[in-house]
Amino acid sequence: MNYNKKSIEDIDVAGKRVLCRCDFNVPTKNGVITSDKRIVAAMPTIKYLVDHNAKVILCSHMGKPKGEWKPELSLKIVAKRISELLGKEVIMAADVAGEDAKAKAAALKNGDVMLLENTRFEKGETKNDPELSKALASLADVFVNDAFGTAHRAHSSTAGVADYLPAVSGFLVQKEVSIMGKALSDPERPFVAVLGGAKVSDKLNVINNLLEKVDTLIIGGGMAYTFLAAKGYAVGKSLLDESKIDYCKDMMAKAEAKGVKLLLPVDVVVADSFPDPIDGPIDVTTVDAAAIPADKEGLDIGEKTCALFASAVKDAKTVVWNGPMGVFENPTLAKGTIAMAQALADSSATTIVGGGDSAAACEQLGFADKITHISTGGGAALEFLEGLELPGIACLEDK
């Protein structure tokens, strides 16, 4: 996939109606936005378009209404928040690409901003229905994709509309593509990838793809136990995917054949069972990874492993991290994830954290400002690391 895509800075937007797909899929409670992080992240693109006299038509999905009109998933609260951040009124359409949206889009003046209703209120959105794509395209002269979090979905408002309009990236997507694209296509070496999280099955293709590119691959989290089992170790009551043991053996053999260092935990933090509640107090001990007792469950990496992984990161020039090292929601079992975040924060390398739980961990622990790039899309970042073509990026014009 070509990562060198045109952005809003490469085209003239003055006087043009610009349909801009953002990620306003924000968490809400009782009709109030509980975190406006995604709205704030979209503001540089929106402000640029306003300052350059575009007629701005914003669109996004929120939640999973599945083609039904659900008032609690209306984007009206988002329009209100954007108005507050912009210091000017955002015109709210009563539909997605119907009569009201058409009339309001046609009446826009330079520098005006409007927001379409939740794109997933339309049944055709998730099916990438050409009729909906055409209707959305008819509102505008140019399409801007600034929603990296949905770039791995081929929906009408993320990719389909680009069949009918010139398409470029906003600043958020541009940053994601340039930083992650360079890391995967032309990384500064040594290149170290750190993978964690619970399931091996979620990361199968990522492991396979990264072994083609990295100098060192570090595996922690729940998925490490299937690798330890593949080495012939007993893993007690730890998370284990027996159907993937052969796959793990193949990956270890592939790493060896390619001269890639594959690092696994050398010691683990174990307990009698998974914490309940997840953040409740828990009695733990640390044992050697080759000697996990039959009645214990591994829930975090131990201190020796933390030191081993940190030293591998220390000498790197590029580091990509996706997935926590243990049950980081529990203070007793968060030490491995904290150590990993600390190692990335202390490193002089280009450090990239791929969305989801590891991004949340960096933010909660206060390390976010010391990481080069924290991806805004969990699923999209994973597919990027797998080397897959992302429809919402492939559809943009090449430079």
Image (spheres, rainbow, N blue to C red):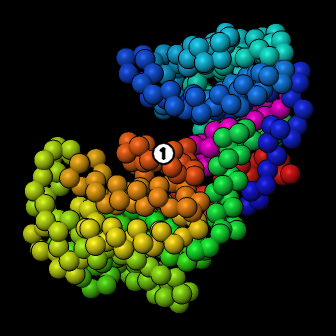
11 left or right of 361 in image: right
- Amino acid type of the residue that numbered disc 1 sits on in the rendered structure: Ala
Look at mark 1 in the image and give the residue it sits on.
368
Q: Residue at x 13, y 65 (%)?
A: 285
Screen quadrant of the N terminus: bottom right
The residue lying toward the viewer, choosing from 129 and 191, is 191
Q: Residue at x 41, y 43 (%)?
A: 366
Image-quadrant location for residue 124: top right
Whether 99 is drawn above or below 344: the answer is: above
Q: Residue at x 42, y 52 (%)?
A: 358
Query: Is 130 included in the stretch rendered in magenta?
Result: no
Query: Is 153 included in the stretch rendered in magenta?
Result: yes
Q: Residue at x 16, y 51 (%)?
A: 275
Estimate the x, y position of residue 336 in percent, counting from the top left: 31, 60
Q: Can residue 123 be seen from the camera position used here?
A: no
347 left or right of 337 in image: right
Image-quadrant location for residue 318: bottom right
349 left or right of 330 in image: right
Image: magenta residue range = 133-155
Circle 1 SS class? helix
Q: Can residue 366 be seen from the camera position used here?
A: yes
Q: How many marks?
A: 1
Estimate the x, y position of residue 338 in percent, counting from the top left: 34, 54
The residue lying toward the viewer, choosing from 393 and 217, is 217
The residue lying toward the viewer, choosing from 380 and 314, is 314
Estimate the x, y position of residue 158 in percent, counting from the top left: 68, 39
71 left or right of 333 in image: right
Estimate the x, y position of residue 42 in percent, counting from the top left: 63, 31
Q: Residues within 10 Å of mark 1 (few under 14, many from 20)?
A: some
